[in-house]
Image (tube, grey):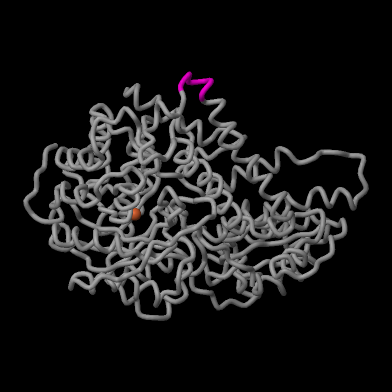
Amino acid sequence: MNDETQILQCWLGEIILAPGNLDQKLESVRARYQVHEQQVVVGSRGIPAYSRLHVYTSGYVARLKECLSADFPILKKFLGDEVFDRFVSATLMFSPSRSYSLYDLGLNFLRFLENTRPRRTDMSPEQQVLLELPLAIARVERARQEVQRAPGTEKIPLPLISAADLMFQDAGLKLVLPASVKVFQLNFTLKDMLVKLQNDQPFELPAAQTSYMAVVRADYRLYLHELEAWQFHFLTATEHHVNFYEAARDTAAKVQRPSGELLADLWIWLSIAVAQRLLIVQGL
Amino acid sequence: MSNIPNTPRLGLPNLGLGVGLRSKHYQHLLREPLQVDWFEIISENYIDDYGFSRHVLDHVRAQVPVVMHGVSLSIGSTDPLNLDYLAKLKQLADEIEPAWISDHLCWTGVLGANTHDLLPMPLTVKSLKHVTERVGQVQDMLKRPLVLENPSTYIEFRNNEMAEWEFLSQLAITTGCGLLLDVNNVFVSAHNHGFDAEQYISHLPHHHIVQIHLAGPTDYGDLLVDTHDQPVPHQVWQLYQLAHRLTGGVSTLLEWDARIPDYPDLVAEVFKARLVWNGNMPATPVKASSQPPVAHPLNVLAATVYE
Ligand SMILES: [Fe+2]
């Protein structure tokens, strides 16, 4: 291995990644390497090493902040720039990028929010909602990116089916949840607030109540759909049971409803769900 | 592998004038004629993405050549090569069949960390040997010549044993790799370190230059920074004219990654290259700024809104 090159790379890498402002970074790296930056870097044209290194250190933080701001725009509006930036800086400090892809940095950010969220039990439902909201928004925004990049349904022709096809065909008919759909169970209703935040409209904090939502891409556009409990469980069930009746039976048990009643609801909803690209039908 | 070609551009085609494919222009490109001869993509923005970006890329690729330009190869790092990344790069290349694949003479991180910046190499005999070996490995894996770009730099190491042009020249001649000459980066680095930009360009092995980058930097007082957010200034066009003459004409691409103009204005900027071929220099000055510098802004894919 190339010792001298490796030491220089570790030295510059540490200056860029170390916490604090440039003075603090340089102080810790000087102590660790027993060398002053002027002994490492040429100060040609009278420009000191300090100003030169500053281009790299300020650029690092600014660039990754810009990247996460683009990945989590609604969360940034909800938290405000200052709080959002603090979470970003903390993520970069405790969970810096180790991937070639900046797409993965969004996951580091989400994991950081998950691992540091307050876990208290002595709070009112309203306070609980307020504490859970940032993470819920972040999860939906991450799902948006996953859905945006997933192999989608755009190249699959929309089948001309009637609900009767779905209900009365034999076991040959299969339902598949596309990778371009993500479903959520939440402790509050979120869609209204997300849309208002996105459009910079005034919003109210949602009330504590179980709700269900899907993020879906259809024809390269993104949609948020609020779901009923049985719709959520049915979509989730199609991840495990491709057969329509098995998924329906599973759902009936989950939502504790008579299967006949659920089948009647599914009968109406399925062709809509297929048209909304929430489900792919195979074997027609 | 020693490969001293005597054909221009390593035998690769002169694609003409191109621009970077950026999400801001996706809707325009789906509706309107492309106008330019070719596009360059940031490879990492399309790896593992099968959504709208890929749809637009396929639309563009069906009409004109595309070059894959990466920022994560980290060819100069003392960490092992990232084989996972190389496999993804190869897969994308198999799918879209680029005219060539390029990255930078730089390293992006060490000990597993990634700064997502293009960091300067120590320019020593030992590091040259290190990069030479790795270029060979990458070329074997990708089964094509790698094309490497000179980065903008803000520091030079005291232990450097050669100039950057010397390092790149030896690397190209030894490995047979191509060079992506970024004349804006030469202008920026020459200013920052006080070397002669024209001499740098004159000394490169011109048969290895397969592509030229144009861009506009920002003047932050002492240092020029490669911001990719400005029109191409007069000095960069001058270096372009020199490179154009020395190479006999190679694929030329305008980079613009922040404060991106509307598509017709972007195209008008790269078409100024035709004026330069005929000796007419645009008089654009270098833009000055007092804001904190941000080098190499990444082209972050714009967030899509919910319908
Ligand atoms: Fe460039």
In this rendered view, identify the residue nearer to me: B295 or A254: B295
Q: Which residue: 86% across, 48% down?
A: A128
Q: Is residue B83 visible?
A: no
Q: Which residue: 84% across, 64% down?
A: A204
The magenta segment: A30-35
Residue A116 colored magenta? no
In this rendered view, identify the residue nearer to me: A225 or A246: A225
Q: Which residue: 30% across, 54% down?
A: B94
Left or right of B278, for residue B68: right
Seen as rendered, the residue at the extreme left is: B6
Q: Position of residue B171 (x, y in %)?
A: 20, 39
Left or right of B26, for residue B204: left
Seen as rendered, the residue at the extreme bottom is: B32
In this rendered view, identify the residue nearer to me: A167 or B56: B56
Numbered marks: total = 0
Seen as rendered, the residue at the extreme front is: A46
